[in-house]
Image (spheres, rainbow, N blue to C red):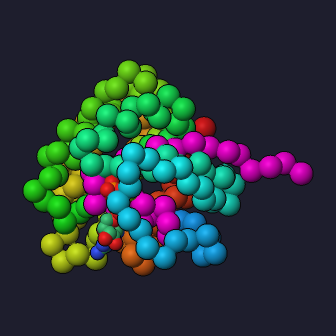
């Protein structure tokens, strides 16, 4: 029969926001790793939703590696931008990085979806998704579908619904 659609996505956001932990949760239990370590450069990883096999570019968020992100924009069909909801001090850095991405020549004129994951919602100091949306300037986004979802990568809370949104909005 028909194979599942294969889709590349770019997973970005500041270091320590939880990108690799999220991707690990999205994998089938047999293929999960027991310990997540900070990503060096990038890692390519796979997971699936009911209709799509995702090939994810799990980028390092450390400042010295952020210049690698742009190399993967042109081959991606969607972007996942992960935010540590409790990292109030660096919310403006996250905003700057998000807007560099949105204004990048390889993304600015492509209507591919942006999924923002407000991760670490379990932390007691976490900002709400409305506060994060305002801090990042999501209301200023034009020309592409976007969505913000609250997640906790440690339990997987919010991930299935968020992935469903992405699956529905990928062309
Ligand atoms: P880089 O690879 O350095 O860019 O970081 P990353 O965004 O991949 O973060 P990573 O997944 O390595 O997680 C960083 C730390 O945050 C780890 O100690 C995780 O266990 C922790 N973490 C991830 N998600 C959550 C969450 O939802 N809640 C809490 N409390 N901790 C989390
Ligand atoms: Mg990582």
Which of the image's four quarters has the C terminus?
Answer: top right
168 or 77, which is in the foreground? 77
Residue at screen point 38% across, 37% down: 69
Is 166 left or right of 98, judged from the image as shown?
right
Q: What is the magenta range? A: 1-25
Return the residue found at the far front: 40
Can residue 148 be seen? no
Q: Is residue 23 rendered magenta in the image?
A: yes
Residue at screen point 64% across, 75% down: 30
* Whole-percent x, y for residue 23 in the image: 48, 61
Is 22 left or right of 16, judged from the image as shown?
right
* Whole-percent x, y for residue 161 in the image: 50, 64
Q: Is residue 48 rendered magenta in the image?
A: no
| Image quarter for ligand 1 | bottom left
Is 49 left or right of 70, judged from the image as shown?
right
Residue at screen point 60% across, 59% down: 47
Can residue 107 be seen? yes
Residue at screen point 44% across, 47% down: 42
68 or 135, which is in the foreground? 68
């Amino acid at each position: 029969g028909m194979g599942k659609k294969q889709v590349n996505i770019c997973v970005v956001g500041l270091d320590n926001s939880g990108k690799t932990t999220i991707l690990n949760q999205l994998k089938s239990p047999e293929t999960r790793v027991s310990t997540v370590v900070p990503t060096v450069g990038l890692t390519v990883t796979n997971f699936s939703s009911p209709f799509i096999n995702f090939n994810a570019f799990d980028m390092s968020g450390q400042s010295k590696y952020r210049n690698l992100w742009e190399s993967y924009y042109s081959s991606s069909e969607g972007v996942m931008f992960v935010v540590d909801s409790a990292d109030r001090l660096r919310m403006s850095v996250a905003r700057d990085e998000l807007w560099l991405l949105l204004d990048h020549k390889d993304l600015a004129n492509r209507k591919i979806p942006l999924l923002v994951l407000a991760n670490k919602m379990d932390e007691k100091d976490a900002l709400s998704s409305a506060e994060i949306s305002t801090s990042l300037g999501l209301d200023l986004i034009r020309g592409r579908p976007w969505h913000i979802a609250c997640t906790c990568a440690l339990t997987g809370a919010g991930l299935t619904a968020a992935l469903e949104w992405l699956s529905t909005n990928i062309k």
